[in-house]
């Protein structure tokens, strides 16, 4: 079934509902979203993946059709459940898209979030149809359902399409605002009118932000740009009346009632925002820039216990004394400190003294994590910030990558890290590819190496087309984690290094490890 055929089918279904509708007219604002805007927008995302449509969507849309064209029956619960199940499956699909990618490409996450938010709309629709006591009036229950079909489903997806055309720092900020606003709205409706007012102010900031971004975006045609701007611009008008309504609930000085909001929003949201937006984006739906991950991944996964035991069945035949064979594969050898080069090429000839510092805000989590890591024997960092010597060995292993060697680090006899070092090339750049086996999965650190005078920086933060990052590999999924790490190595004197390892989560620092690295014996540092 082509997109045009699906458009025709759903248009006919909705027109029949309009003719035989037995509910108050304003209920059609949600019905048109369910029978027209939701399925057609999903088609713009799914493209050829029509299994969701054929097996789950059609029963859901038939259920909505029956609910809107019949009076209350004993089967209303069944029909509402079918639609609820459909929105749940859409949310699962959105979650699956996210898990395959992780914390990257915020424009794709906007689409994922819209699909996941639809389930919340399905829950409120179910509550409205079945008469569940939500603590609110029936009209507010229904209004919450419509909110999650328009502002929480359509809007993030339209913004995702906009981001596929053009992204910037401002775009990331606008997306963050739009993502958190539905939650703040729900909290405001539930707990406090002033919180609802704050949510509207957030929406205003986000909406006018993406209107400006839409003016700057390179659309496929003038017609498409005009329709998308009309769609976004209509929200710029309706949100002002939402502000007056929310302010009236807080201060009691405005008189914008629900009846006015229904008529006003009914026209602007249904006709201008949703219909114009859907037509605009269907003229030329921007393709995703997501190409997936194609770097080599270690096939070595652990069970509950990692430690040295995981290496016993994967010992390689080669012999290595360093983490890399030749540093010139990463950097210009002549410009880097000779001791740093020698440390990476002859790692086993150096002693490490570490000082671990968990940042104050993270210490409660670190204490709980320590109970687990001490059993698993992986990423098993001490809770104390006392300087301790790390000992270890470098062992050749076979894990499906090239020239992989395991660096086992211990404090006394307790295993701290089992890290598998390899490398790969992509786009004429060589990355350090480090795997840490975890229970039934592995954490992958892809690091870029840069020189700062004679210092060396290893970082997981790269450009948009870089492989750099920290990932979790589980079965066929490779999920980019919201973690960043950076190593800075510098030579203090010949044969002695100082290193600083910083870890961040969502850009917030939570762990810093300082190292002093000494040569074990007198060697020729070349």
Image: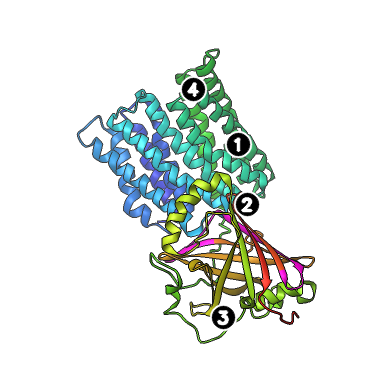
Name the front one of labels 3 and 2.
3
Upstream in sequence: badge 4 or badge 3? 4
Crowding around mark 3 (Cα neighbors within 10 Å: few <14, some 14 to 19, many 20+) is: many
Name the front one of labels 4 and 2.
4
Q: Main secondary structure of the magenta part?
A: strand
Q: Indicate the colouring scheme.
A: rainbow
Given residues 208 and 12, the one toward you in this image is 208
Left or right: 274 in relation to 492: left
Upstream in sequence: badge 4 or badge 1? 4
Residue on which disc 3 sits? 403
Crowding around mark 2 (Cα neighbors within 10 Å: few <14, some 14 to 19, many 20+) is: some
Q: Secondary structure at mark 4?
A: helix
Q: Secondary structure at mark 2?
A: helix
Given residues 388 and 51, the one toward you in this image is 388
Residue 113, above or below 51: above
Marks 4 and 2, Cα distance to the nearest angstrom?
A: 37 Å
Q: Residue at x 51, y 26 (%)?
A: 195
Marks 4 and 3, Cα distance to the nearest angstrom?
A: 62 Å
Residue 29: tell me if it is visible. Answer: no
Q: Residue at x 61, y 81 (%)?
A: 321
Residue on which disc 2 sits? 165
The magenta segment: 471-496
């Amino acid at each position: 079934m082509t997109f045009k055929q699906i458009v025709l089918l759903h248009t006919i279904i909705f027109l029949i509902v309009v003719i035989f509708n037995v509910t108050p007219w304003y209920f059609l604002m949600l019905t048109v979203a369910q029978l027209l805007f939701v399925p057609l927008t999903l088609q713009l995302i799914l493209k050829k993946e029509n299994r969701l449509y054929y097996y789950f969507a059609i029963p859901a849309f038939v259920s909505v059709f029956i609910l809107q064209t019949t009076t209350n029956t004993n089967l209303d619960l069944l029909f509402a459940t079918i639609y609820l199940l459909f929105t749940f499956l859409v949310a699962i699909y959105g979650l699956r898209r996210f898990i395959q990618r992780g914390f990257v490409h915020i424009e794709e996450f906007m689409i994922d979030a819209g699909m996941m938010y639809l389930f919340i709309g399905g829950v409120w629709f179910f509550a409205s149809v079945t008469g569940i006591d939500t603590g609110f009036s029936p009209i507010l229950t229904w209004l919450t359902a419509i909110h999650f079909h328009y502002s929480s489903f359509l809007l993030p997806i339209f913004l995702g399409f906009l981001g596929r055309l053009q992204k910037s720092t401002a775009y990331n900020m606008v997306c963050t605002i739009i993502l958190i606003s539905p939650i703040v709205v729900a909290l405001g409706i539930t707990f406090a009118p002033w919180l609802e007012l704050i949510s509207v102010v957030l929406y205003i900031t986000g909406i006018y932000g993406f209107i400006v971004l839409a003016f700057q975006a390179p659309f496929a045609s003038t017609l498409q740009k005009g329709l998308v701007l009309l769609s976004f611009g209509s929200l710029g008008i309706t949100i002002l009346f939402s502000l007056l309504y929310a302010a009236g609930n807080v201060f009691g000085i405005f008189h914008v009632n629900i009846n006015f909001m229904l008529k006003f929003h009914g026209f602007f949201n249904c006709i201008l925002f949703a219909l114009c937006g859907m037509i605009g984006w269907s003229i030329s739906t921007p393709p995703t820039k997501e190409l997936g991950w194609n770097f080599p991944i270690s096939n070595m996964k652990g069970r509950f216990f990692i430690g040295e035991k995981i290496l016993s069945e994967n010992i390689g035949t080669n012999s290595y004394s360093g983490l890399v064979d030749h540093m010139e594969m990463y950097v210009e050898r002549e410009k880097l400190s000779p001791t740093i080069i020698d440390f990476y090429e002859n790692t086993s000839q150096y002693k490490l003294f570490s000082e671990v510092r968990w940042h104050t805000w993270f210490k409660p989590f670190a204490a709980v994590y320590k109970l687990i890591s001490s059993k698993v024997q992986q990423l098993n960092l001490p809770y104390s910030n006392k300087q301790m010597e790390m000992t270890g060995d470098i062992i050749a292993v076979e894990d499906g990558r090239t020239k992989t060697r395991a660096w086992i680090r211990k404090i006394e006899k307790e295993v701290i890290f089992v890290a598998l070092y390899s490398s790969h090339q992509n786009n004429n750049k060589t990355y350090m590819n480090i795997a840490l086996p975890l229970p039934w999965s592995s954490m992958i650190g892809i690091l870029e190496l840069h020189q700062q005078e004679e210092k060396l920086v290893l970082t997981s933060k790269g450009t948009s087309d870089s492989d750099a990052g920290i990932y979790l590999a589980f079965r066929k999924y490779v999920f980019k984690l919201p973690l960043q790490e950076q190593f800075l190595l510098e030579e203090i004197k010949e044969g002695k290094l100082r290193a600083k390892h910083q870890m961040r989560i969502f850009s917030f620092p939570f762990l810093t490890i300082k190292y002093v690295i000494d040569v074990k014996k007198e060697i020729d540092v070349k």
